[in-house]
Image (cartoon, coloured by chain):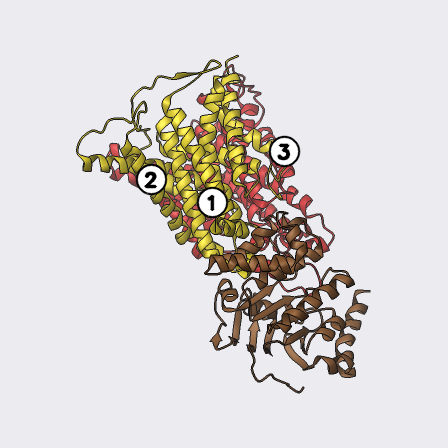
Amino acid sequence: MSLQFLVDGTVAGATIGLGAIGVTLTYSILRFANFAHGEFIAWGAYATLAASAAMGLLVGHATPPLGPFSFTWLTLCAAVIAMGFTGGLALGLDWLLFRRLRDKGESIIAIMASFGASMALRSLLEALFTAQPTYFTRALQIARPLGFGLRATPNQMVLVVLAGLLMIGVHLFMTRTATGRGMRAVSENPTLARVAGIDVTRVIRITWMIGGALACASGVVVGLLVQVRPFMGFDLLLPLFAAAILGGIGSVPGAVVGGFTVGLAEAAAVAFVGAQWRGAVAFAVLIAVLLVKPAGLFGRRA
Amino acid sequence: MLDLLGYAAFFGTTALTYAIMCLGLNVQWGQTGLFNVGIAGFAAIGAYTSAILTTPPTQAHLGGFALPIVAGLIGAAAAAGLASLLVGALTLRLRSDYLAITTFGVAVVVQLTCLNVQGVTGGPFGIGFIPRPFGGFADRPGAFAALQFLGMVVLTVALFLALERLAQSPWGRVLRAIREDETAAAALGKNATAYRLQAFALGGAVIGLGGALQAHAIGFIAPDNYLPALTFQIWTMLIIGGSGNNAGAIIGAVLIWGLWSGSGAALTAIFPPELQARAASLQVVAIGIILCAILVLRPRGLFGERTAVSRHVDGLETNPSTALAEQDSAPRAL
Amino acid sequence: MSLPAPATALLVAEAVTAGYDPDLPIVRGASLRVAPGEILAVLGPNGAGKSTFIKALAGIVPIGSGHVLLGDHDITHVAPHLRPRMGLAFVPQTENVFGTLSVTDNLKIAGDALADRTVAASRMAEMFDAFPDLAHARALQAGRLSGGQRQMLAVARALIGRPRVLMLDEPSAGLSPKLVSEVFRRLDRIRESGVAIVLVEQNVRAALALADRALVLVEGLNRHEGLARSMADDPVVAELYLGIHRRAAEALV
């Protein structure tokens, strides 16, 4: 039995975990399941592609790849710019759509609107870039041995590390800063938060920015390791929800643990059952959580 | 001329199959406030069940059992209803959004199953030779299309009347009470979850019936028919028609299907082939924006609900300001 | 219906209407005034709108008409999260602490609203001195505290901003008589430091024993107002207040 699925699962888990943090934060702070979150992943990936192409034109000559990796420093700069852009996109969608429904107190309508927005955003990507997949790089990478018969490409290794650093950063932000405390307070009790002097509007803005930026990072990881296509985020939506619910809605460490669990389970299913069933794994995890522990691993209530 | 009438009849038949799915969704959402994001999955369950039951025996998929269409339709409604019952039993006691997420997952898994379990579903090739009603008239296309359309009209009207009656029945009134005010419903001593579950299963059965009727109207099904886009279409139809209103559900379905196929035809005529895929995507963008705009500007749809409606229960639970309602003695959420 | 209005009222509410549905206000023109170092008890039967009134003053229930003054400022439409900074603190009745956050984080949240970090830290140390129970439990999740400790934490959270006016919604609810007198002793000491206190209470006897003045709301309007001491013995008030209660009690049976 090959344990290579552990590597693939860890890589998938990193992308799912990054996305699931955004899902769990918006879910607990804005109080609705955002079906458009997957589109932030896809838009983030395309924005990174566009930004690095634009910077490539500005630089005027081809930049060499960084060390053993298949991407350049331009890609990394572009990813940072695109994270800001995607945060802004999430903020803009909130301003246009969700804010108005929130004011009316209709959270279930907000879910439906997010479903409509998801269709519109994804189809807009198709209209702009066609449904055909595209790539950051077509360079082939040689997988290097890690021991125990496992192999990983340099890209996989560095991206998992970067994703892990981002996750730790968000966790520290949530637990050590005033804004993070405010976010946790709003997630538990928005009215008490206002009474206690927290600017809930500002907390909501920051939540969208963080959720959008992390979704973009997730999209860049998928884009660099697999491919970029308009459906890339929508196809991750069920794993994101499964991870967020498994970890417990509102818990950042829970979303990360949930993300790696779903990623590893998917990779195991691909290795031992068949790649065509990958998409059903997240559903199986979801059903198992709802049956056994609907509040999730680190959640407080269902 | 006859061609045009035949096309109109075919258009009408297809539109009414959507209308029936819309009526099923209206039982779940409009009357009970349950949020189903897996309509495509339940429609697929109905379509595949009926197809397997009614097609002639073949090696390409399970069956067929060559049963009469009526048996296929009953089987479709039963299978989709049962699936809804299971999903509802698992999620209805949890947060309302969990139902949405779970039904979304159901649709993903049903579509994967249709695609991958070739021995049962025919895999990516789908199922063909699904018998069409009034098959005896197949050699006279005009009469064939007209009869199919009339059959669908009769069925839709019958379903409409039955659901209207149900909505006015004590059962329907309890459902409305549950949706309007959970505490009042609980005070009445009614088991709200059981009622919700019944409504969810009934709505799911009707959606499955709609899926099956569509399969019989077209004669061919494949996994690609049951992508999330179908769910999105049905939602748009119901929201535009007006949730809670059965007549609105039917009008919304015909209207949106007309808009969808009309603009599709226009795009084919206007754009050169290489741009048509992009134009079709823009069509979805436009419908998505229309859906969102209706939700923000006119949440009760173009035709609204006839009975006065306050906010949904789920909205109340999560709305920070209403969670503070005045109750001087009882413990309350703040 | 005498109005022994304090000359130097700090918090003034005049003819306030408030409620969740603008067409059906629960508070229908209520008024109050409270001066520094004074405790005002807001009493009334169930559903009289006491709780909605105090929440409207805290800014979390929309005000339809009338106005609210804090010192010289009109705060009728000031966002609720800005009010603690202006010196108006509110302790809700239930769920008045963040149960998933530690005791320390609950206090830090109030400190975060202050401009100065070092001031926030020293105020928190003061609170731990004043409430040794909380100091011992500082790393504990607030949801694990006892009912009395929670009430103390909620009060401590409100005091971090050094409020000029402290409003409490039924601080005695759910507490044993011993804890109620402990909480009320604390309130008495806070008042002595010059803070104006508005207290919504069901526990009429205890509230009148503590308060300087009392206000009785009925159906969202001021029905009776006076010195707490005289009100406790006033047969008219007792009849009005307790009579309504008796009828409500009978209706329940």
Query: x, y (%) of residue C46?
Result: 71, 69
Give the mark toward the camera: 3 or 2.
2
According to the picture, the residue beneath numbered tag 1 turns out to be: A173
Quadrant that contains the C terminus of chain A: top right
Seen as rendered, the residue at the extreme bottom is C2
**Mark 2 surroundings: few (<14), some (14-19) or many (≥20) residues within 10 A:** some
For chain C, give the colour: brown
Report how far apart the C-alphas of labels 1 and 3 lie in the structure. Answer: 46 Å
Query: x, y (%) of residue B223?
Result: 46, 27
Q: Are marks 1 and 2 on the same chain?
A: yes
What SS does tag 3 mark?
helix
Q: Are marks 3 and 2 on the same chain?
A: no
Chain ID at mark 3: B
Q: Residue shown at 69%/73% (left/top)? A: C43
What SS does tag 1 mark?
helix
For chain A, give the colour: yellow
For chain B, give the colour: red
Q: Are marks 1 and 3 on the same chain?
A: no
The kind of residue on which mark 3 rests is Leu
According to the picture, the residue beneath numbered tag 3 turns out to be: B82
1 and 2 marks in contact (CB < 8 Å): no
**Mark 1 surroundings: few (<14), some (14-19) or many (≥20) residues within 10 A:** some
Label ID, residue A80: 2
- Residue B244 visible within the image: no
Q: Is residue A111 above or below residue C111?
A: above
Compared across the picture, whether B317 is left or right of A95 comes to right
The kind of residue on which mark 2 rests is Val
Comparing C110 with B184, the one in front is C110
Query: x, y (%) of residue B177?
Result: 65, 54
